[in-house]
Image: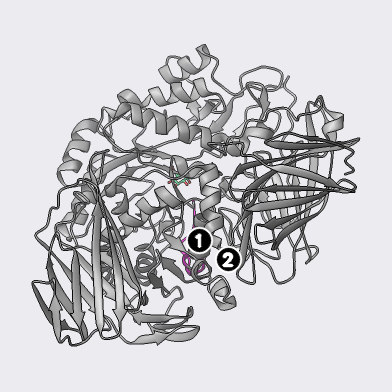
Amino acid sequence: MRLEQLFSGPTSVTLWGPRGAVQIQHPAPGVLRVRHAPSASDSTFTHPRLPAKQSFAVVGHGGHALTARRNGDTVHVSADGVALALSMESGTWTFHDSEGRLLASSRSVAGEPTPDYPVVRYRSRLALHAPEDEAYLGFGEKVGPLDKRGLRFTFWNTDVMPHHPDTDPLYTSIPFFIGLRQGVAWGLFLDESWRSEVDVALTDPQTIHWESHGPELDCYLIAGPAPADVVKRYVALTGRPPLPPLWSLGAQQSRWGYENEADIRGVIQGYRERDLPLDCVYLDIDYQDGYKVFTFDRARFPDPKGLARDAAQMGVKLVPLVGPAVRAEPGYSVYEQAREKDYVVRFDRGEVLMGEVWPTTVVFPDFSREEVQRWWGSQLQSFSETGIAGIWNDMNEPACFTVRNDPDSFTVQGRRPNGSGRVEGPTLPYDARHGTRRHLEVHNVYALGMGKAVWEGLKQAAPDKRPFILTRAGFAGIQRYAAMWTGDNSSHWTQLESSIPMLLGLGLSGVAFTGVDIPGFVGRANGELLVRWMQAGMFYPLMRNHSAKGTPRKEPWRFGEPYLTLARETLRRRYRLLPALYSLMQEATETGLPVMRPLSMHAPAEGDALRAYDQFLFGPDLLVAPIVRPGHSRRLAYLPAGKWLSFPNLDRPGQVHDGGGYVIAEGPLDTVPVWLRAGGAVPFTQPALHTTDANWKALTWHIHAAAQVTGRLYEDEGEGHGDFRLTRLSGGLDGDTFRLERRAEGTLPLAREGEVIRIHGLAAAKSVTGARSHRAVDGALELEVGAGWDRIEVRL
Ligand code: GLC
């Protein structure tokens, strides 16, 4: 794409050629936005600026200063932390960081409109150089190993049931990846909601090809150098996640097929009778009256308020499913309002689009419009009065089983290529109208708009609470509103294993609050699978048991002993871990870093860390390598360089391993292999049957002594917007002295008398100051300190 004219302003540089344009901006330190418009000359665009473009994903889009200098064919753009050199001849560029390191380069950019009446479709193509030793991580909700080199993906939110290891696309599209080469990371976010496809060095091992059906390729190039730097910058662009209520981190139970109130009460009772921790039960579509959103079937759920009240008394919250499709039933108020206000999606020629989902004939609210979002949110006012605690957004790709075509309506259906794998789930036609836009453009952000609608609605309905939303579909930025689960998986061991790289990829793509259906949605599970899946799932930020209608029941007690006892122990461990999990969720609100992290985030230069896709870090300090195969009682685990204390089940410290290699971890059925990083400090509490608040009454720090120790604990009431306390530990070993300091900020009063600090790696002490008492336990030194302690010193 040849460029001929250069327009340079203080915050943007635009280059025009006979067949297209490129615009460069500097939205944030370390980030350049390169907007490629390869078919600009064929459209209505006018010089010297490209028209403003609405982003659904990017928030707080500041225009920082940049400078441009032309030197022959090359335009050099420099900005805070990054630089770009762009060729006028080809429109291609090289992207550097402030240290002059070459991070990425493009090979070609091209595009043209394809007249495809009545929608103009585009083919906009960008090719990037893919050095053979570079790995590619992220891409949102995708299957496959961590490094996605050699794969190909489509970004088109799709309802697939059930999904398999080769299924693509899935429900959520996040066109973002991290390149990682020789320990240096950079990122690319393609801010295009249009359908797009990426070939990650599959067809040509040296090239990434990205093709969008929109007129532009709006790229954010993000510098590292660490993978965590790229994630932080990407999340700053697309929005940091809010802190969820504490109860949503507790155990959750769901099933498609809890038919009535008695079923729901029975499930809660089932948990309590067996001393199983539980915080939340979902109401699947079965609660609805004729599958009408915002209604209860009064025959089967005669007293939703009473049900919510009784559940609350047992420490359990209720979260009902709400899909976007509105039953087209005259007299049904949601439908009548939607029609009257013209809030629905239409066919190209103007008729209201009727589709079919659970409630048979339906209309679809147009969530691309803010007034529609506000209207949908306002429905939550009276719905929330039933006492429900959150909303589960499902079928929001949107799924549409069939389009009830008006015989006079010409529509452009999606196309399905031949070959294996369904590329597109049934949804709305490409040319369906969302206000002035076409479905092809806004399909991928449908769930984002619905998420925003529910988020704002819940905040208005209960301003003193923090909204909880679970979503199936999403786009870049969905983390601002919702937690995400990965949809309809199956009770198969491969799906337990693949849940790990899937959630890691989502976490790298900004979605920190995630989980998958335990122990698989469709199919039959056995007790071993349940227990193994719970052992991995106790580290998922969202831990939910869910299953499909027609499958055998999958609550933890359905498998007999020893599985029930093992399930109980696993849930109790989850609740012990809540101070650490809650603190990590709070950290995500500040940095965007996920709770579940690939080993490469800690050790970006270690090739084996990249290949360890069935292991993960839980925050900075715990490494988890769950058993994910049937019949196995040990496994190979890679430990990055450094020292790692074997800490199976978070309670039985073993030996210290030297990292930088593999170990064989013992994992009999009652054990999940875990390690504690040298220098790590992780806060635990006592198990409980449900959460109450996050101002912990009992607190134990587990510390693995090293030269540098850091720890972090965030506490508040677990709900609402009240006081908080953020505690930081710092210190470490210096010769024969171990020191630790505690600093706290915030005004939340302490709810405990004292704390326990267990320091692994310190056996006997000559003297201890700052603690009430000390003793040796399991080869570690355990101190008891007053709650407001500020400094301890151990002489060895
Ligand atoms: C979809 C959801 C699933 C739900 C079912 C019935 O398949 O993914 O979780 O149970 O619909 O509502």
Q: Which residue is mark 1?
A: 504
Give the answer, above or below, for where 443 lies relative to 380: below
Q: Which mark is residue 131?
A: none
Amino acid carrying mark 1 in the image: Leu
Residue 362 in view, yes or no: yes
**Badge 1 local density, few (<14 within 10 Å), some, or many (20+)?**
many
Q: Position of residue 395 (x, y in %)?
A: 50, 40
Label 2: state its secondary structure. Answer: loop
Q: Depth check: give the residue in front, 612 or 728.
A: 728
**Badge 2 local density, few (<14 within 10 Å), some, or many (20+)?**
many
Span colored in magenta:
487-496
Q: Position of residue 509 (x, y in %)?
A: 54, 53
Label 1: state its secondary structure. Answer: helix
Q: Depth check: give the residue in front, 578 or 439.
A: 578
Q: Depth check: give the residue in front, 363 or 581.
A: 581
Q: What residue is rendered at 31% in x and 48% in y?
A: 248
Q: Position of residue 608 (x, y in %)?
A: 56, 78
Amino acid carrying mark 2 in the image: Leu
Q: What residue is rendered at 22% in x and 57% in y?
A: 277
Task: Please say which color scheme the image uses.
Answer: one colour
Residue 71 located left or right of residue 135: right
Magenta span has 572?
no
Q: Which residue is mark 2?
A: 146
Report the predominant secondary structure element of the magenta stretch: loop
Q: CA distance from mark 1 to mark 2?
A: 8 Å
Q: Are marks 1 and 2 in contact (CB under 8 Å)?
A: yes
Residue 214 located left or right of residue 108: left
